[in-house]
């Protein structure tokens, strides 16, 4: 006759063996993510309906934009790019009532290009502050986007 302790060890062993041989599968994933990015990288050339805005600044002047108060439709891309020859670090920031991230989503970017690519995700208005040399807020400019 088998004692209780040997019987319990045998049952536990069989359960563990069935788990290891059968494998585990999560039939109810909490937050499924595709194994790849569904958005194109930012270093792709602009498409026909993309809006390209160029920013520039010198050593003492405010940031200059090729366009401001841009109007986009949901799904349309905005490409912010430095003027040719501008090699300084620029910071983009947004907060508060007109938070840029509420209406625009930043895409994966190639840090070497200096471009920032955004996609309009919902209707509303967003403000992005463009700060030269990452710290010179007195020379910054507010860039406005309206998504319809």
Image: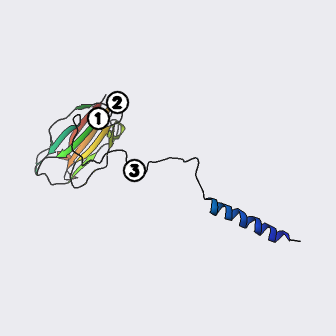
Q: Disc 2 versus disc 1: distance between alpha carbons?
A: 12 Å
Which mark is drawn over residue 13? Answer: none
Residue depicted at x 76% and y 68%: 10
Foreground: disc 3 or disc 2: 3
Q: Are marks 3 and 2 in contact (CB under 8 Å)?
A: no
The kind of secondary structure element at disc 3 is loop
Q: Position of residue 3 (x, y in %)?
A: 86, 71
Q: Foreground: 37 or 53?
A: 37
The kind of secondary structure element at disc 1 is loop
To which quarter of the image does residue 89 belong? bottom left
Q: Disc 3 versus disc 2: distance between alpha carbons?
A: 27 Å
The kind of secondary structure element at disc 2 is loop
Q: From what the image shows, is residue 102 above or below residue 41?
A: above
Name the N-terminal-most of marks 2 and 1: 1
Disc 2 marks which residue?
A: 123
Disc 3 marks which residue?
A: 36
Q: Foreground: 135 or 106?
A: 106
Q: Disc 1 versus disc 3: distance between alpha carbons?
A: 21 Å
Which mark is drawn over residue 76? Answer: 1
Sort mark 2 into few (<14), some (14-19) or many (20+) by Cα contacts within 10 Å: some
Residue depicted at x 18% and y 40%: 53
Name the N-terminal-most of marks 3 and 2: 3
Q: Are marks 2 and 1 in contact (CB under 8 Å)?
A: no
Sort mark 1 into few (<14), some (14-19) or many (20+) by Cα contacts within 10 Å: some
Q: Position of residue 5 (x, y in %)?
A: 81, 70
Q: In the drawing, does residue 6 fall left or right of residue 21?
A: right
Q: Position of residue 70 (x, y in %)?
A: 22, 32
Foreground: disc 2 or disc 1: 1
Q: In the drawing, does residue 7 fall left or right of residue 111?
A: right
């Amino acid at each position: 006759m088998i004692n209780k302790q040997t019987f319990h060890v045998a049952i536990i062993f069989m359960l563990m063996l069935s788990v290891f041989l059968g494998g585990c599968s999560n039939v109810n994933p909490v937050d499924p993510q595709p194994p790849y990015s569904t958005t194109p990288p930012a270093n792709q050339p602009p498409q026909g309906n993309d809006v390209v805005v160029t920013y520039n600044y010198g050593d003492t002047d405010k940031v200059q934009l090729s366009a401001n108060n841009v109007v986009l439709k949901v799904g349309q891309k905005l490409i912010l790019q430095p003027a040719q020859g501008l090699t300084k670090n620029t910071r983009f920031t947004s907060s508060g009532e007109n938070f840029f991230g509420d209406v625009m989503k930043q895409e994966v970017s190639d840090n070497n290009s200096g471009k920032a690519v955004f996609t309009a995700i919902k209707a509303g208005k967003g403000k992005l502050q463009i700060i030269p040399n990452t710290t010179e807020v007195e020379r910054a400019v507010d860039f406005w986007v309206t998504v319809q």
